[in-house]
Amino acid sequence: MPKRRPYHHGSLKQALLDASLALIRKSGPGGFTLREVARMAGVSHNAPYRHFRDKEELLAALAAEGFHRLTEAMVKAGEPAPSALDRFRRSGRGYVEFALRYPQHFAIMFEFPWRFDLHPLTKQEGERAFGTLVQYLEACQAEQSLPPGDARTFALVAWSMVHGVAKLAISGRLPWAELKDVLDFTDAATEALVVGLVKAVSPPS
């Protein structure tokens, strides 16, 4: 019998989440099973069912954790900035930094075929992350550094852009290995987006 690693009372759930991340890091989301998670956590194969109904519920918990950390990363990057536009710009850096720091969370959040209606906490955290970006854009419109328009549409455009940068960075498809260079490129892409939004909705002269 393999030796079971002890876990402190009340920490089983976190032990399972940590083991899940380690398994995804090793085998990817496709190789994920609750039995293997239990083995890596050093608990019985029935232990995961104390907290999670099935594999999808465990992955949904990881996605919720990831969206929560994403919001924190965008706010941490953006809040020290002196203006709404600077906060918006820097939130893009926070997004990419999060993706590079937590690539397993990032994969679960965006590569698993979620039904958010079945996982309300995951939906709530995802909407909070997107809502943070919307708020930054609305603040830019209020200070007139970005033109009026549908802030949610603008936010979706911005999200799509930084998400693409993050995916390219994670997969090694950008020509820079250093984080600073990737973040400098993120800044340049965000600035291009700002200029594009201004031109796209400004009346012709």
Image (cartoon, rainbow, N blue to C red):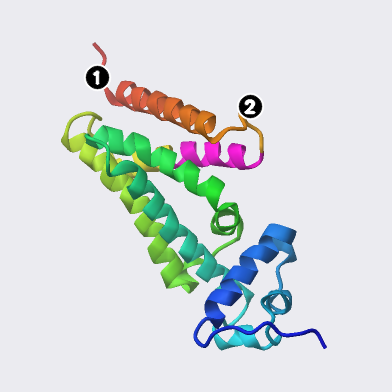
Say if 53 sits above or below 110 in the image.
Answer: below
The residue depicted at 56 percent of the width and 82 percent of the height is 12
* Magenta region, residue range: 159-171
Amino acid type at image mark 2: Pro
Residue flagged by tag 1: what amino acid is it?
Pro
Task: Specify whether residue 170 is painted magenta.
Answer: yes
Instruction: Find residue 183 and name its label.
Output: none
Circle 1 — which element? loop
Distance CA(mark 2)–CA(mark 1): 37 Å
From this viewpoint, which residue is outermost toward the left? 143
**Near-viewer residue (43 or 47):** 43
162 in relation to 31, above or below:
above
Please give the count of numbered marks on the rendered protein. Answer: 2
Q: Is 91 displayed left or right of 20 in the figure?
A: left
Give x and y (percent) for residue 64: 47, 65
Q: Which residue is mark 2?
A: 175
- The image quarter containing residue 78 is top left
> In percent of the image, x 64 and y 70: which residue is there?
19
Residue placed under numbered mark 1 in the picture: 203
Q: Is residue 181 visible?
A: yes
**Quadrant for the C terminus in the image:** top left
